[in-house]
Each structure stands twice: as structure tokens, then as C-alpha cells.
Amino acid sequence: MQRTHKTQDMSHLKQPLFFFLLSAIAFANGFAVHGQNPLRLWYQEPASSWMREALPSGNGYMGVMIFGSPDKEHIQFSEGSLWAGGPGSGDRYNFGLPENASGALDTVRKLLEQGLTAEAEDHMRKHLTGEIHSRPDLSFGDYGAQQAMGDIYVETGHSAAPGTYIRELNLEDGRIRIRYFDGKTRHLRTIFGCYPERAMVYRFENDRPGGCDYRISHSSPHPTDSLMFRDQTLMHYGHVNDNGLAFLSSITIETDGIVTYREGMAGVADATFLVLKHTAHTAYKNKYPEYRNPEWEKDALTGIESLQRTDYAMLEHIQKEDYQRLFSRVSLNIQGPSYDTIPTDRRLEAHAGGQTDPQLEVLMFQYARYLMISASRKGAMPMHLQGKWNNSTDPPWACDYHTNINLQMLYWPADVTNLQECNVPLFDYLRQLVIPGSHTAANFYRCRGWVVHTMNNAFGYTAPGWDLPWGHFPAGAAWLTKHMYDYFEFTGDTAFLRQTALPLMKEAALFWMDYLKPGPEGFLVSSPSYSPEHGGISRGASMDHQIVRDLFNNILKAGEVLKIDKHGFEPFRKIRDSIAPLQIGRWGQLQEWLEDADDPETRHRHVSHLFALYPGSEISLKGTPQLAEAALTSLRARGNDGTGWSLAWKINLYARLQQADTAHRLIRKILTPVKEESVQMDKGGSYSNLLCAHPPFQLDGNMGLAAGIAEMLVQSHEGMIRLLPALPAAWPSGSVSGLKARGNLTVDLQWQDGRITEFTIHGTPGQSVMVSSGKDIIQFQLPANGVIRSASNH
Ligand code: FUC
């Protein structure tokens, strides 16, 4: 039995207890006090559904879901590098590369040339698909799946008195708080992720003289290797059964109570506060071909010791600095009524019922930024389909890295909403895909360079998927390197361009130099190709051509910026200019394929052929008005339904086409309340915790929506900054600050009754900037302080 930290400084308690008094008044009056802070999600009941109601928190590495029951807190958690599958998953994992692939490509191409598509697809299915091997309990065999790690339960033995319970997530400080009164005692829980300490922090406090009792237990869906308690720390060693990947989850207790431990359960008695400092590590390392870190346990124990030395007040301080530094860079205000006094779930329903609530749209925008800060930080894995939140060992689509839209969309808002650092896990992941991706390129296609396809895991699986046609999408790597070039354009970081981006871009381009082949009319075409995830295998899916043209363009621009020998770049120019161009088809649409085969009746969720409009920039209203018109025709034909991410993509596309009110209608559509948790293809919306519903929960929709809102306010893809290119009637007046534009520029902007009243651009002294704020285009040279402030009445 041990009593710890009894004499510690309690001053940090004052602030939360003060807060507490405020909410006590709110309880007494039967309503909550919130007017001051519209950036929060809040509820009057604990969560019962993980997907729809629990609130997400994270420290970049770990994703945690908080349920908030007074009698038993449930903390469900996952760590991004805990995966089943890959090396050690049986003995047949081979990165998806079958032995008989090479040589099949020529036959497939010939069959396609002869118009024998069914035969071509059949031959590909036999020879040009990746290989997986079945494993117990895993839908995708030794390809594996991201894994939930465990659950922590904190039992209290009390319940909340009726009408006293509030559960909230405050985006301003990145903390979840749960407050209630149990009839005698007031309770407050504060939960946050602290990235620099790689910690999750859960604090329980109460105002009962003599304190309360708590019982803490830890469980996991994976086999436990050992469970121990030392130095106030509950340590849970386990491993993934499938591949033996080891992990350690630890909870260090800080309290003024009496701590006991018996058979896996820690008891804390007579505590006025209890802090659980939680961290998780795995033996995974993103390094081909083993994907293991032999030093992992040493690293984990060093991290745990650091956490044992760092008290709550310090963790709070570190989290505050780290979180605020990122989150506070962008502020968005849209004038309109404030409905923050209505719980978020009811507010969502009211919005769907027609209530004008632009603040809810702002909340969604900032929520995406909170989620990215919580889920994507240097050193960690990139965000998967559910970010870092996963409560399953066999999650939908393996919670993997889908590169035919999803992984890209997850990172769309990173640059423009001023969270550039959050790109780093994606870039690190891409770097590690180059070696396995080059084996895939050689193995299937005898091509140089690197390639990835539709589904990618944590273990270098870059082969085509194990079935067709969905599995064939060789443009994934080229598309992903666009993020690197965009990062350069937004930050102006030429060292990054030279050392990291350009080498990966060139390797991706090498693949395409070999893969493109002359097609009809002498143009180079992608063959075999597939327009995700629509139609069948064919020659010349437009999306491939658009992505590759974009890649080659970016390489040429990089060559100019870095002043690298022009002649070395000539082949890129030659190939770029020979790729089959965009085409307008028989009903005025942008063609999805080489042949004019688009069906005006299809409502398919993927709009792959509109890549050139967004995220690409080959099509623009000003630069290519006819193609823009064709893109609009195609987009309209697809309708305004779809999965969460499909709606989000359409917001960005309509923003580029300056169809503001349609873009806004789609924002409202994403805010449709959804209860469905199983896979649906045309019922996108949001759960009451505002996580986007594919359904099921898929984070790309949250991120795509935030990128879309930014794109409605500021665009910078045409060599100029466009202010308010797609301002909907529903947002007549407002302001935004901190959005980024290409050229490492930062934009602040105010508007009133649909007109810009003032804007400020921050950049480098002497930099020349073009701004379009309506009809006029103004050219500036930034003065010595690098800031231009302008009032305008356009
Ligand atoms: C693509 C989409 C699906 C889903 C999956 C994760 O295959 O077509 O709708 O989002 O990725």
C-alpha cells in the first residue's frame, strides 16, 4: 500500500474547480453556460456507441475514444503502428508479389488493343493481381489490418444526478471535459493528448472532503504476455496473435489518494484527484523488409520513465503550448445566430431540419483541424481511413492506406489550413514505400521507378489489389508525390523540394515513362488502366493521364525553381506533351475514358476524371473555360449524393467552379445526421460526434470538408490568390485569418454583405503577389515588413 504525491502543489486544481463552480450554477439553472465559446461539441448524456457518440482524443500516435459514463469511464484506444499481417503473419507474406506476373503485361495490352476487354481483365486477374494468403479472423489475410490495442476502465461506484451531466470537447484547448454531480459530490474529468510526451492524460477530480475511490483496469483484444505494477505504473505487455508484433501499454498513476494493486486492478482510495498518464508503444518500425524495431522496448521504457517524472501540471503546460501553436493559427468566423446552447446532437438534427447554423459549419471546419493535430504528428504513422481511431481487430477496409482518393483526401487540408507539420507522417510513409514500390514496378510491369496501387498496408504491400478491377490503380504514387510538391509550393521549402520531393517525384515519373504506351492517334496512354472505382479495365482512363501530366508538370517546375539543368528535364517535357489530352464527349461532359463512353445516368460516388479540376489544376474557369464547363456538366450529372468523402470531394470541385451555393448545399448534406454503422454507398453524413459517416465512420470526409471550406474562401492554384472565390449566400459576413496560399503566403480576410472589406497578405519582403478580389486582379510587391493590408470595396 502506498500513498503518493500527498504533499504536491495543488494550485493547478484551482482553475478546474473554479470552472466547476460555473457549471454548478449552470446545473442549478438547468441549462449550460456556453455563449463565450462556440468551438465545442457537447452532450447531455454519456456515449453508448463508439462510432456515433464517443469523443475522439489523440496524441498523434494514439487515437482514444472517450465514453464518459459516470460509474465507469471507458477509454478505448489504438496506436497507429499496431498492425496484423505482413512479415510473421504465417510464412507466406510476399508483399503481394506473385512469381508468375512478369510477361503478362504485353498480352493484356494486345487484348485491349483488339477491344477484348473481358479477356484482358481475365488475364490480368490471373497474372497481374497481388497475392494475399488467408489468415484466421482477418478479412484480408496476411495483408493484415490496423488493430485496436485495448480498453481502460475506471470504475467509480457512483452515478450522476438527473440533469447534472455534461460531456464536451473544446476545440480551443483540445480537451474533453465531463462534469456531473452525484448527489453529494461534484466531479470533473479532463482528457487530452500530449504529443511531445507521447502521452494521453486522463484526470479525475472531485470536491468530496476526504476524496473518492476509483478502480482502474486495462484489457486488450490481444493476448497478454505480462501484466505488472511498478513505480506507480500499470504495464500491459501483449502481442498481436497473427504476426507476433509486441506492444506495451502503460498507465502511470498520479494521485493524492492511496494506491493499491491486486490481480491486474489498481485501486485508488480517498483521492480528490487521480491522473492516469497513458502511453503505448509497439515493436513496429516502418522499414522494409522486416518492419520491426529491435530496440522498441528500451525506447518504450525510456518514454515511460519520462512520463513518471512529468506531473500533470507540466503535461498540461506542454500540451497547451503544443496544441495552441498549431490550432490557433487559423480562425474562422461566419456571422449568424449562435446555437451553442443546444447540445451538438440536437443541433445537428435542427440543422438538417433547415436551421441556419453557420457556426456549426465553422465547428466542423475546426474539428477537422483538431482531428489532424490529434492524429498526424512527426514520428507517428500517417492517418488511416479512421485517422488513429479504431476499436476493431478486423476494421472496415483494414483501416489501411487507400490511395485512389482516401489517403490523399485525409491530407487535403494540411497545407491550406496551416497545419503543414502534420504532413510529415505521410511523407515518411511515402519514403518507405519507394523500395517495395520499385519491386512491384519491376515484378508486374518490368518498369523502372516505383508504383503503388489501391490498397497499401504498413508492410510495403504496394502490389495491385488481389481482385479486379478495384485493385488496379498504378497512379497512386504519382498522386501522392503531388502532396510533396504542394507542400513545397505552400511553404517555399526548397531544401525539401531538392532532397525529398523531387527524388520521389522523379522515381514515380520513371515508372510512367516506361508504363505509358502509344495508343490510338499516337498519344501516349495508360494501359491497362482503371478509373477508380467505376467501369472496368480499359486503355486510357483519363484520371491516370491527368495525374501523370500533373506530376511531369511539377517536375519541370521544380527543375526551374532549383535551376537544375534543363536538358536533363527535356524527356519529361516530351512525354508530358505526348500524353492523351482531356476530351469533351457527346453530351458535353469531360470524358472519363479514351472512348466517349460516359453514361449521363450514372451517380457513381467516385469522380476520378475530375482530378484535373481538383486537386489538380489543369482545368480552371479562367484558363480552360470549355473544359471547366465540361467538368461542370459531368459533376452535375453525378448528382449530390454519395459517401461522406464523395460529398466532400464535390464541395472542392464546386468551389473551383465557383458554384458557391451548390458547394454549400453539399456542406449541409455532410451535416446530415446518420445512425447507420454498416457500409453504405450513398448515405454520407455525420454521426452525432461529428465524425463523418461514409457510412461507416471514415475520416476522409471530415478532412475533405475542411479543405473544401478553405477552397471556398481562398484559392491559389492559378498563380494568384483568389479571395472569396465561392462565397455562398448563407455566409454573407465573416472573417478568416491564417489560411495559407501557395508562395508561403498567409491570408487574413474580412467580408460584409458578400463583399470583401479588408484583406491582409503576409509573405516575404519583396515577393510579388497577384490578388483577385472579385473582378479586378491587383499585383503587389510585398514591402519591407512582408505585409500588405488593403481595404477594398469590390
Ligand atoms: C474506396 C471507396 C470506398 C471506401 C474505400 C475505403 O474503395 O470506393 O467507398 O471509401 O475506399
Image (cartoon, helix red, strand yellow):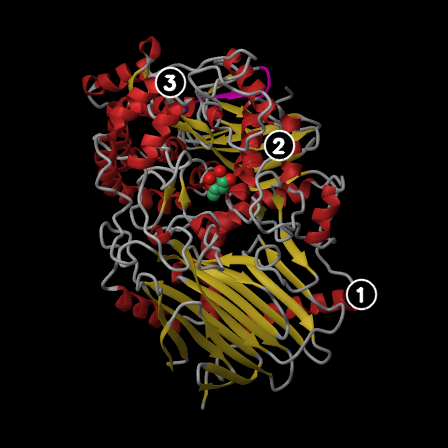
Question: For mark 2, does the 10 Å Cα neighbourhood hold few (<14), some (14 to 19), or many (20 or more) residues?
Answer: many
Relative vertical location of residue 420 with respect to residue 34 in this rendering, above or below: above
Q: Mark 3 or mark 1, which has the lower sequence index?
A: 1
Point out which mark residue 115 bears: 3
SS for callout 2: strand
Q: As drawn, is 350 to the left or to the right of 466?
A: right
Relative vertical location of residue 614 with respect to residue 254 in this rendering, above or below: above
Q: How far apart are marks 3 and 1 (CA)?
A: 74 Å
Question: Mark 1 touching mark 2, by CB under 8 A?
Answer: no
Q: Which residue occupies 76% across, 71% down?
A: 162
Dot 3 beta carbon under 8 Å from ligand 1: no
Report which quarter residue 356 is drawn in: top right
Q: Mark 1 or mark 2, which has the lower sequence index?
A: 1
Residue 587 visible in image:
yes
Disc 1 marks a residue whose amino acid type is Asn
Tag 2 residue: 750
Disc 3 marks a residue whose amino acid type is Gly
